[in-house]
Image (spheres, coloured by chain):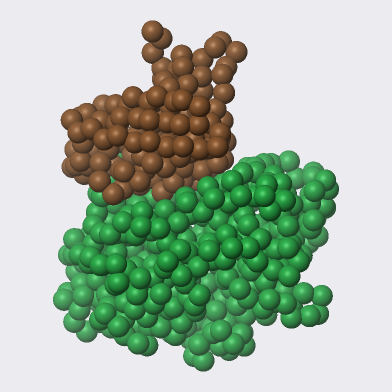
Amino acid sequence: MLTGHWEHFSHEADMGVRGAGASLDQAFEQVALGLTAVVTDPALVTPEKMIRLTCEAPDVELLLVDWLNALIYEMATRKMLFSRFEVRLKGKHLSATAWGEVLDVARHHPAVEVKGATYTALKVAQQADGDWLAQCVVDV
Amino acid sequence: MDIARFERKSEFEWQIKPFGRMQVPGVIFASEALLREMDAKVAEQVTNVAMLPGIVEASFAMPDAHWGYGFPIGGVAAFDPDHGGVVSAGGVGFDISCGVRTLHTGLQLKDIESLKTRLADALYHSIPAGLGSTGAIRLDAAKMDAMLRGGARWAIEQGFGEAADLERIEEGGCMRGADPSQVSEQAKKRQHDEMGTLGSGNHYLEVQQVTEVYAADIAAAYGLKPGDVVVSIHCGSRGLGHQIGTEFLRQMVIAAPGYGIELPDRELACAPIHSPLGQNYLGAMRAGINCALANRQILTYLTRQVFSRLLPQSRLPLLYDVSHNTCKLETHTVDGQPKKLFVHRKGATRAFGPGHPDLPAALREAGQPVLIGGSMGTASYILAGTRASMQRAFGSACHGSGRAMSRHQALRNWNGRHVVDELARRGTLIRSPSSRGVAEEAPGAYKDVSEVVNSAEHAGLARKVARLEPIICIKG
């Protein structure tokens, strides 16, 4: 299986997160890693505690925003960071498992808090090479 | 950006004539240099806002405008509720009522010189800053609702300040019309341990000194003179506001077609003011404003405690408290007639002119203080609303220096430790839990704040009163 990847793209005030993968599921997993990377290096986050999430939205782009916002909510209320994700998309429905650990300021050196995922530069699409891409700007 | 698309109305006013679905012109207030440096996305976003239903006069952008989401950061737009006007969750943003307040200290620089390091450390120790930091206050459901209804007034009733603070806060410290029942349990949960926290990103608490006074009469009315030490606090409604923004943006994106609204950009999600969703959002957003006002009031209390311990001779009365991300019902004169409008300010400061009835008696003749935050190592400014500013962009002015480059780029250009050391050499002590955060907020990542405030003054948006230089900065 091809491994996916994530990257950040520039937005003047905030930060863009982009995930790419051989499947839509993988693109969603990668963009979630990109979200963690806004805060800290995902390699510093031990995937020791698991949570499950589900989302539902009228279309796949709104579903991406919902997915990232669900993670932002869990990060904020559980004071956790996540570094491993498994996503299953079925139509308008997403179910996911995320693994991570409780934030440790001394070890994770968190750069910034993410306030929310936005509809700016929002795109979920299959590329010419067959890979899937999922991206949007997050407000920090 | 390419400035050829603009019609130059005056040296500091640039207009995009209505085309396509634009209902009103787009107007950017800026010097030619600032306009050229702006991302082309600013013009695109100003144009998109001009397409929204019920917009009045023009879609405005302030001199510090930069690429936002939906609205530009630095965007101002007013909507007429009786002509299909809308309220937009995107037009307020995630950090509802993010703002700045400035406190006097009664001290001069010489009074704190020998205590500077201790003061920086004590403030850093007492002010919860950065991701994951928590406040000492926990609110049960009833107290949470009381806070969301009462704002800074609630905080003062709880002992976090003095009644005299209230008249120095927009809306007297309590936004009317807040409806805590429209704030979700998730939003309240997100706020559970975040009362009295600074947050992260561009939020800060700074000890500053007045280095220059430009308008002696107004400065006197504001109680400012060269050498004075003041404290400025920049933060907002924390997790509660972010969650309200997130939830209503989604609802408005989905509901817009049903209201016959064709969104030029989904981030401009909005609903008619006279719709149940519009009213629900206004109730929740006003509760978010109160959360921000209460939060800044609690941070003020924590700051006063530190000062009274280390500098018992100090007193920290509030100069003023402004909010940047709001939608407020205000009366403005349009075509010679007074009109009640819903004014969105997204990264823009209210700047009411002299004589405005909403200003406290002590400031009414001078005009509203407009508190402009610079970046970490650079100057901040205090401006004043003028009579002319009421006629320009519904009594609005800029809010900060505005980013000149992305966090991404800043991270490539600077190292947090080096930034802290360099600023210490220049006499500014930085305290922050995040070295990477400091790099992303490096002074060079921001526009020249002096150019921004000069443009605001020349454009007639506000008048320069005083310049402040940072001495200590607690950065989230």
Q: Nearer the viewer, residue B232 or B332?
A: B332
The N terminus of chain A: image quadrant: top left
**Is A131 drawn above or below residue B299 in the view shown?**
above
Q: Which chain is green?
A: B
Residue A98: image location, x then y, percent: 29, 31
Q: Nearer the viewer, residue B118 or A81?
A: A81
**Is A14 drawn above or below residue B234 in the view shown?**
above
Residue reaching furthest to the bottom: B361
Q: Is residue B273 visible?
A: yes
**Side of B204 relative to B366 (left or right):** left
**Is A126 drawn above or below residue B438 in the view shown?**
above
Q: Is residue B428 visible?
A: no
Residue B414: image location, x then y, percent: 38, 38
**Side of B198 relative to B23 (left or right):** left
- Residue at image position (68%, 53%) is B259
Residue A111: image location, x then y, percent: 32, 42
**Side of B217 relative to B115 (left or right):** right
Residue A110: image location, x then y, percent: 29, 42
- Residue at image position (62%, 54%) is B270
- Residue at image position (28%, 59%) is B192
**Side of B123 relative to B216 (left or right):** left
- Residue at image position (82%, 52%) is B18
**Is A60 drawn above or below residue B427 in the view shown?**
above
| Figure label count | 0
Q: Which chain is brown?
A: A
